[in-house]
Amino acid sequence: MKTPYWLLEEKLLEKNLKILSSIKEQTGIKILLALKGYALWQSFDLVSKYLDGCCASGLYEAMLSDEKFKKETHTYSPAFKKEEIKDIATISDHIVFNSPNQFKRFANLAKEYNPNISLGLRVNPEYSESPVEIYNPCGLYSRLGTTIDNFDESIVKQIDGLHFHALCEQDSVALEKVLEIFEEKFGKYLHKMKWVNFGGGHHITKDGYNIQKFVSIINSFKNRHPHLDIYIEPGEAIGWQTGTLVATVLDIVHNGIDIAILDTSTEAHMLDTVIMPYRPDVRDSAKVGEKPFNYRLAGNTCLAGDIMGDYSFDRPLQIGDEIIFEDQMHYTMVKATTFNGIALPSIVIKRLDGTIEVVREFGYEDFRDRL
Ligand SMILES: *Cc1c(COP(=O)(O)O)cnc(C)c1O
């Protein structure tokens, strides 16, 4: 198979979905897929068997949910445009506004286009243990969600649900704290609501996540508020450790250290390694010095900083060797670009029955036609 390519393994995806589904059984919550993190619709036949729908961040994601997932569509955007409200409302089950201002501008319009739509407001609990500031929706001066000081009681009677998103790759302990503060600040409105949405960032499918604690947090919240439907909308937890990005060594150059140039790129294909940042795991490799042969792995763009990191291997790398980056399904293909004219990785799915399907290949036109 021609590299670079992403390889999703449905067996691994199903393992995650079964964990999420068991949580649904133990709590009665509904779980939505956050398309922002994972939108590989060619796998939605499988995902939609287990999850309840998608959370979309605007018109296009809502359209994808409607067209390819065909269950619930919940749409939130930091700010909606007037010309998009009709299309969004028509295909959404929930619409969540970011501010009382947006709510007042568009709630009635949304209802007009879809009388069954449920109206929500995103609130900002102003508490988060997010490990990095770029992924902290409750940081200083955050535009995401309405703080209690900016809450406008005049719209309460029209709101069906409250939404918060405050976590990032976190355990249930963090949820417990955020939920406590959410209830402290916004609890007085909950008796008027029909639902709550606890956002994403729940690292449920990661080894070691305390699922029992999650279940007990949710069930005790339910005891306090039995009339509320509860949603969560993880993205990363769905795609977590379900596949790889496979690349080839194109050349090995030496400048103080050995540097292997690959037919992939951090900036174009693994952007989170740059902005989180983190060092992606490479199959059969270790940290520098732990194995005898050390290399810096770097991308095939002209960006000097296009570097995956320094790794060691049991054998010397050769031109033509495959390098397999682990856990490259979430927040990768949804962000990939053709920066520097670099080829987009193909998308390959290993189906449950073992067949391998190349679902998408990209060419020159994909580079040209974005411009
Ligand atoms: C990003 C995001 C999610 C998904 O977050 P994950 O960390 O991928 O679980 C859910 N809801 C909202 C509003 C988001 O912005």
Image: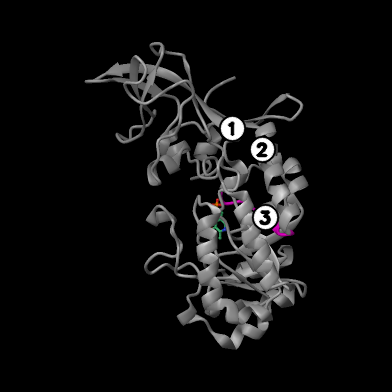
Relative height, residue 28 to residue 14 (above, below): below
Point out which mark residue 32 bears.
Answer: 3
Q: Is residue 52 visible?
A: no
Q: Which residues are magenta?
A: 28-37
Quarter of the image for residue 305 reads top left
Q: CA distance from mark 2 to mark 3?
A: 15 Å
Q: Measuring 55% from the left and 44% from the top, which residue is drawn there?
A: 334
Quarter of the image for residue 58 reads bottom right
Residue 98 x/y as whole percent: 54, 71
SS at badge 2: helix
Relative height, residue 32 to residue 258 (above, below): below
The amino acid sitting under disc 1 is Gly
Q: CA distance from mark 3 to mark 1?
A: 21 Å
The amino acid sitting under disc 2 is Leu
Q: Measuring 77% from the left and 75% from the top, which residue is drawn there?
A: 115
Viewed as shown, does residue 86 lie left or right of 171?
right
Specify the farthest residue to the left: 256
Specify the farthest residue to the bottom: 154
The amino acid sitting under disc 3 is Leu
Q: Measuring 53% from the left and 23% from the top, which residue is drawn there?
A: 3
The disc, 3 or 1, on the residue closer to the chain's N-terminal end is 3
Q: Residue tagged by mark 2?
A: 13
